Amino acid sequence: MTALLLHGYASGLYSSRRIAKAAVERADFMMIVAGDPPDFRTISEFRRRHLPALAGLFVQVLKLAEKAGLVTLGHVALDGTKIKANASKHKAMSYERMKRREAELAAEVERWLKAAEAADREEDGRYGDRRGDELPAWVADKAQRLAKIREARAALEAEAKAAADEEMRRRAEAEAKRKAQGRKKNGRTPAPPRAEPDGKTQRNFTDPESRVLKTKDGYIQGYNAQAAVDGAAQIILAHGLTQSMSDQDQLVPLIDAIKDNLGRRPKEASADAGYCSEANLAALAARKVKAYLATGRAKHPADAKRPVAGPLTRAMRDKLKRAGWRSRYRLRKQIVEPVFGQIKQARGFRQFLLRGLDKVKAEWALICTAHNLTKLARPA
């Protein structure tokens, strides 16, 4: 069953129904199932039950690729791509609209409940012993909608309160550190963080953990998938997935994941401007990884117009400008971007099938495993 799933993912078939159909129509799939094709429900249940173990196959396949000589850890390129969630962006609602709609629905449901009671009394008199105490379907639907809105609103409020508490804790630590160092306080005291969500903060009812993300083609309801790719044979060395639009917090975890997976770090790493920050440049220097990070969005990375404040960022800009077209940064596009093209265009993976952050992370791990298997199969 594992071989069937992986071959399906490597062939661009992700739905359990499409895999089950291929098992009775395609010779390569028929050979795997030995003429005994499973039902699509069996495939779906197997994937659901063993999803964490299937995600763990990534490291095993990666080590096979290393033994085959497809991994050199010379130059590694990092990038992220936005992929649609199994949810529509039109099934989301802002916090401000939730409050307004909750009040409207509560009043509407109450009015309809009274109407239903009146109708029940009339029907009892008309039909005698026949039942008439069930709520009409349209009342139940509104009540369910109201419950969902209240649940989503409570979740947004809990997230906002947790973020506010974390910000207060961070400020208290910074203040204690300042006092311990005897430094003078500069500027005005910042306003306390809001414990209530912003009115425009949205939550999706189908997949609450997905987020509205901006892409070059507009906004999608989805996740930000990450990959670190080796320059020798475009093998994915580490993967990640986040709800955030920003890539900045993903660079160090990806570099550390490479060390966890293979026991050593790459010699060089390149990434676009979304990953560039003083903290990331310092972290790469501490890990003895040569960094080639764009300091801004531009045709040539050293020509970015955005202001460069930190010393490490200025040094990186000068480093890229000094090397010109010979800069190792030029390798980034030809290493990592074709991988996303192969996954999304050649194999047609443009939307996750599962819902929830943990399940989607495991699904992305399966996609990366299938990609590495296709690379491993070619030299073999």
Image (tube, grey):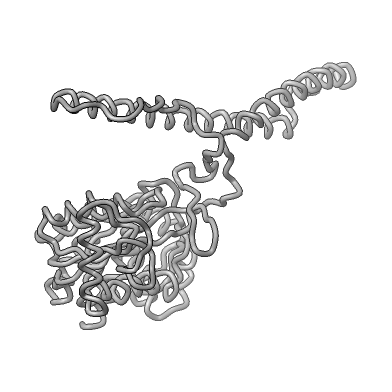
Say left or right for 152 vs 305.
Answer: right
Q: Is residue 36 depicted above or below 277 in this figure?
A: below
Q: Nearer the viewer, residue 137 or 106?
A: 106
How many marks can you see? 0
Q: Is residue 206 left or right of residue 77?
A: right
At 59% across and 40% down in the image, what residue appears? 93
Q: Is residue 24 visible?
A: yes
Residue 10: quadrant of the picture: bottom left
**Residue at x-position 17% and y-position 52%:** 282
Q: Could one spot residue 61 in this view of the protein?
A: no
Image spot of residue 267 (x, y percent):
12, 66
Q: Nearer the viewer, residue 99 or 130?
A: 99
Residue 354, horizontal then vertical, whole percent: 44, 52
Viewer-nearest residue: 301 or 333: 301
Based on the displayed image, in which of its 4 quarters is residue 297 positioned? bottom left
Q: Residue at x 44, y 43 (%)?
A: 209
